[in-house]
Amino acid sequence: MRILRASLLPLAAALFFWFAVRARGNPLPRAGSGSERPVSAAEAAADSDPVLKAMQEELERSKAQLKMENVPAPFYIEYRVVDSDDYQLQAEFGATESERRGHFRFARVVVRVGDYHLDSFYESGTGEATSMPLDDDPLALRHALWLATDSAYKSASEALTAKEGLYKRYAIEQTVDDFAKEPEVQSLRPLVRLEVDSAKWRSVLESATGLYREFPDVQTSGASAHFVATNKYYVNTEGTVLRGGDAFYSISENGSTQAEDGMRIERSPGDSYAEPSELPAREKVLADMREMFQTLVDLRTAPIVEEEYRGPVLFSADATNDVVETLLAANVVGRRPQPNVSARTVGAFASSYKSRVLPEFLSLVDDPTQTRFSGHSLIGSYPVDDEGVKAEPVPVVTKGVLENFLVSRRPIRGFTESNGHGRLSQAGQTEPSIGVLKLEPAEPLTHDEMQQKLLELCRQQDRPYCYSVETLGPRLSPRLLYRVWSKDGRRELVRGGEFQELDTRSLRSDVIAAGNDYLVSNRLGQTSRTIISPSILFDELVVKRADLAREKLPEYPAPPVPSGTAARQSAASQK
């Protein structure tokens, strides 16, 4: 329930006054002496949480006192505090290269002047970031928030003036509200602590990267662990209070080598988890490292893609995941364009609303409320987004047609309310982003059926072979690409290829089948997100030789591994 301080008004009149003010977007009601009222869950939580208590107390003070002469009072203020415990470990060639653990706490304060229809969230008015004390001293915490609020208010006033001048100069008609009204939400989840067995992970990564001794052709060998626990606090003058923590755990390997012609060959597999219990065991990390090294060795002697091929290509679920991330996830979020731009949003789908963007048998759904899939935890899930809006499943693409954008509290044309996808970025701002995005085929085929369909297309087109890609690298370049011979289904690893015309058009027009072999990919980046996708089959895609620079090979061989060292290393890695 929203808290009202209205000692002179009956409760019904006070409620009417509050919602009338919100509807008009007028300045905030000032805090008064207040009558007796029930204690909210957020207030009760603040009694044992000095960070939350300091935020709430300073927000009330700012609401009551923040007003400059000849400048409108704020109609909205929000405080966000992010507290992060971050552990990173990097090993190379059998030894720890770097290890560090840091505790960071910062705040971002947003003050909005104007009203919900036309506000100051523009250029310098998008908020003020500041570091926060780590010792939980209430006065120190409030002092940092006070200075940031004062600075954010002044910047907001200047930004609103600049924005109004821009609108007048270009005769811009404001057809969409700048900021969406949302009901208050109180979500108080437990805080998290990061538990790290650093000695264990040093041993695992040192043993894994030390396996390079068994593969003399490998030039670089690395592995990393990145564990982070983040607690977030959020309060605003609409009455929303959020608090909760999440931890993420990531293990990755990397290695490289060169072929005899100087071509650089690289691999960097890895995965992230929401629960420490899902982290791979020592044996799994070592097995993955060996597999990566063996693939590098195999690629050194693999034949090069010489011809330009146009025909069927099968993408594994892993490769499809990168396609979804690059071509779909980046384009189905509703980002507000600049004020003088008339488009609905930005990106490749800016003018594709209610148009077909995928084959009719494919749909795309983003459901942040889903916490697990096929036994995997999903780091993109959340109950309430970072702007205080409850998460909800959103059918983004239905039977190939773009039905919805994922939007935050910054509306776009046709989407006047948030659908719970305002996510906190590393820069401390909130942006529309995916949560748990799943590509769903209407009639999925089994793995064997997908392989058979590829071979059938090859034979129908009288081709000696077609292509299948297992993993992709930067810019959707194939890292593990295979020729699949139509006569017997034999797979031959090749290198030096690239895809041409792999874009949103080909995704819409050239995909003819999809599998039931879903892969869960948890991804850390600007936001934590999850993509779930199956294998897909293109009936036509161009594969050609990549224009890759050749590097000179080392002038003399790597240092020889002492006799028996590789065997001892292999035995030690099993312990």
Image (cartoon, rainbow, N blue to C red):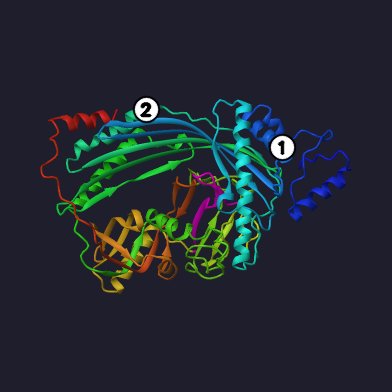
Residue 424 among those drawn in magenta:
yes
The mark total stands at: 2
Q: Judge whether 2 appears above or below 301 on screen.
A: above
Viewer-closest of 466 and 87: 87
537, 249: nearer the viewer: 249
- Which residue appears at 57% of the width and 68% of the height? 342
Q: Which residues are magenta?
A: 419-442
Q: CA distance from mark 2 to mark 1?
A: 47 Å
Answer with the quarter of the image where residue 46 lies: top right
Asked whether the viewer can see residue 110, the reply is no
Q: Quadrant of residue 447?
A: bottom left
Q: Residue at x 66, y 26 (%)?
A: 48
Q: Is residue 100 left or right of residue 416?
A: left
In the image, taking residue 112 as reference, residue 277 lies left or right, namely left
Horizontal placement of 276 versus 126: left or right? left
Q: Which mark is residue 388?
A: none
Most foreground residue, 253 or 241: 241
Residue ID for mark 2: 200
The mark that comes first in sequence, 2 or 1, is 1
Tag of residue 60: 1
Residues at badges 2 and 1 in contact (C-beta under 8 Å)? no
Query: In this rendering, is residue 506 above or below 70?
Result: below
